[in-house]
Image: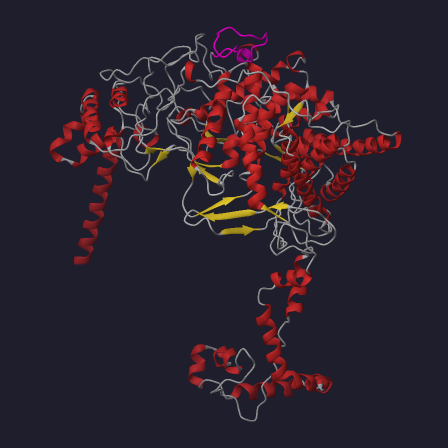
Amino acid sequence: MLKRKYRLLSVCAVTIILLFYRLSTKSLQPDIATSPAAGGVKPPAVHPGVDRADFAEAPAPYAPDKKPPNTRPGFISKQEPKSGAVGPAKPTGATKLGNGEADTPSVKDDPLDAAARDPIKGDETPLPTLKNPPKHSDVVKSADDVHWIKPEEHYPLSKSSIITLPTTPAKDLPRIQFAFPPESAQAKAKRLERRKRVKTELERSWSGYKKHAWLHDELSPVSGGFRDPFCGWAATLIDSLDTLWIADMKDEFKKAVEAVETIDFTRARRSDIPVFETTIRYLGGLIAAFDVSGGPQGGYSILLNKAVELAEILMGIFDTPNRMPVLYYQWKPEYASQPHMAGQVGMAELATLSLEFTRLAQLTSQHKYYDAVARITNALVAMQEEGTLIPGLFPETLDASGCNRTATRPENAMSRAAQKQVESQGLISETKGFGEYSDDQKVVRDAKEDKGARSVASASRLKRRDAIKASSKSDSWQKGPYKADGIKADWDCVVQGLVPAGFGLQQFHMGGGQDSAYEYFGKEYQLLRGREPKYKKLYEDTADAIDKYLLFRPMIEGQWDALFPAKVSVSSHSTDDLLYHYEVAHLTCFIGGMFGLGGKLFSRPDDVETAKKLTDGCVWAYQSTASGIMPDGGTVVPCPSIDRCEFNKTRWWELLDGSKDWRDDQVRKWEEQYGDAASKKSKGLGKRAAIGRPEAKKAADRETRGSQLPESLRAKLGKQSGSPSPQDKGTTDGTKSKGTGTDEGSKEPIPKRPMSHEQYVKMILDTTKLPPGYLPNPSAVYLLRPEAIESVWYMYRITGDATWMDKGWRMFEATVRATRTSIANSAVSDVLSKEPQPKDEMESFWIAETLKYYYLLFSEPDLISLDEWVLNTEAHPFKL
């Protein structure tokens, strides 16, 4: 009875608690759970000397006694469209083309006015909706409703601080291409027949994309589907534009340009924009298509318009305290409107923006595009001057934040003038860096923690502003980097330049994550016509460091004169020991073209010779496999030095089997212990085979009888518990162990003969199909990559040696044979086998780069001459 009373009381108590909870939640405002902090983060007030030409209206300075506008948190509400139209803001803003200073355009077709003349139609394919959309009606309910809106700059540049395109006279650059003599009729016929075959493959791939994946990023060439990994802006279409023009597919080019007009860069199928891929594929593709189709006189001004439209969005990545870019840009207004700082970045992602933004600056006369990438170059130069573990090279990952959060510094290190400048802005506070509360957060936090100071939490903004001033004078927080306009940013760090990210080992190599950064040093020098000498020094220091620290010769069969760049790991605590990984990676195959171009451009003939050997290394890698295609990555046995060495099968096998001595010792012990008995047993095998099942069972029972457990214990543990354990039968070397429970009259079974070193290695080779010189566990996929044929094309154009065309043709035949599907061409999974299996993937660079390089290899040398064009890392040619 008593238990029932307690049960009833418990039910009543739970019911009362639930009622209180329901009443309390109804009194709360729903904004708190679903919205960012009220009012968002206010950008700093504009310094009096800052140029605001990019904005239609300058924001009013912050007034602490006024209530903030009732807008969606994080959204820009200060600048309403002048026309009063409702909808997403045009991405072009109010910026005009010109000489970088004047407001009037200097060209007839102003790309920044394109949005007004050509309304963005957008992709009609519905974008995916959010799984759990916010509950408020004023917050977007699907990705289709969200458009990028140009945010206010938090760290604006003054006109006088913008780094402009160099205006010194252009230098007479050395000739790059070989002076080709007239070709014979037979050679021409052979070349044109090969080019025709390449064009057939190009037309098939383009037709497959048009039919199955139009306006999507990538075709799935086996299933006929599509993928959208790059924001859904039709990556293959834009990436292929210049290839269509170069291959004389003009009708297809025109249709593709019409489709480009419908692409809306102000919305995307992913929440962040991958800046590196977007720049080299989209921005580079649009600029190159504009250049190859005739430029301003070509009649395709929409291509430049769309390039500027995209560039205006990307310029938001540079709005950081030190102007280093955010490389995965959160483009939605809630995030884009907030202050940002760069973080850990890959070397290639950081330093592979210069060609695209420089060329856009040249075409539009807008110096801000050049300024953005010039500051990155200056930071790289400063880092080299400070010193890296391998002089001339950069570690794979860098800290680009500009903040040293581990250092300490006295508060008075900031000058009085700078302190006064910061305080004069009258801000609530600027966003802090990592690891500390902001000033506003500290006030609210103190109010909650101190029972006698609850009124502070509801004090006026003026009161909070006073608290901030007092805090800034007493706290020892570290002051951060200067903003671009000379104002100190209140970040809790000590200012620093580019530094290696993290501690411990730093990696230096020419593969993914670093490759194109070094490629762009010489090419940027060429694009600027020699007007900026720092790029020459960057290239020369890089080439010297590669030659001294990275190059190695693989131990391979045949008479190949081949080199590869290794991956080197260096400890920040000790630079004496370099740890080498002798990799053969497809992504590193660009380096032959880089050395060849740099050797001609900077009159370094040794670099051209090195380029031949580096390119031949990748040609060998293609011919080394059963499919005739180079694996995406692998490890090989190096020669003892950079000089040629004979292929040493014994050494290769020893590296395949690191336990050779132990394995041979086990075989020797087995022979000593069981060799004679095994020989006799093999002779009597026929007789033993005649033993029936009953006798065999009895023999097995005799062997296990002495080690069986008591019947009662066996019933508890299960039948298998009574069987002898492996260690009861003998030791690993075959000798009988002491204390075995076998009958004295029973005979031990003869263990299986251990594998010899030779047997073990042959088993590995039969299983893995490793070519001679390779070590286990390669990445045997082929993703339709272009780097090897890229260097072959450079070698042919630079040396004039027709054998490079033959090498390229053999690569092409093997690639098409292994990758062709009923629709187009597919990446494959195992190039070590004769018939690799398709992966149902066709990245945009198959048409943009790989097929383009094959087509150019068998075209006339004056088509995209290296003396008239410079190609970005996605093979997009920019006019010199």
Where are the magenta residues, as a range?
95-115
| Number of disc labels | 0
Residue 80, given in percent of the width and then of the height, sits at 40, 12
Q: Is 664 situated above or below 408?
A: below
Identify the main secondary structure in magenta: loop
Given the current orientation, which residue lies at the most extreme bottom position?
Answer: 745
Between 801 and 807, the one lying in front of the other is 801
**Whether residue 131 can be seen here:** no
Q: Is residue 588 left or right of residue 336?
A: right
Residue 579 shown in magenta: no
Q: Quadrant of residue 124?
A: top right
Residue 612 vertical position relative to residue 626 in the rendered view, above or below: above
Screen quadrant of the N terminus: bottom left
Q: What residue is drawn where x is 45% and y is 81%?
A: 714
Give me the residue at 54% from left, 15% from top. 167
Q: Quadrant of residue 319?
A: top left
Q: Is residue 474 visible?
A: yes
In the picture, which quadrant includes the C terminus? top right
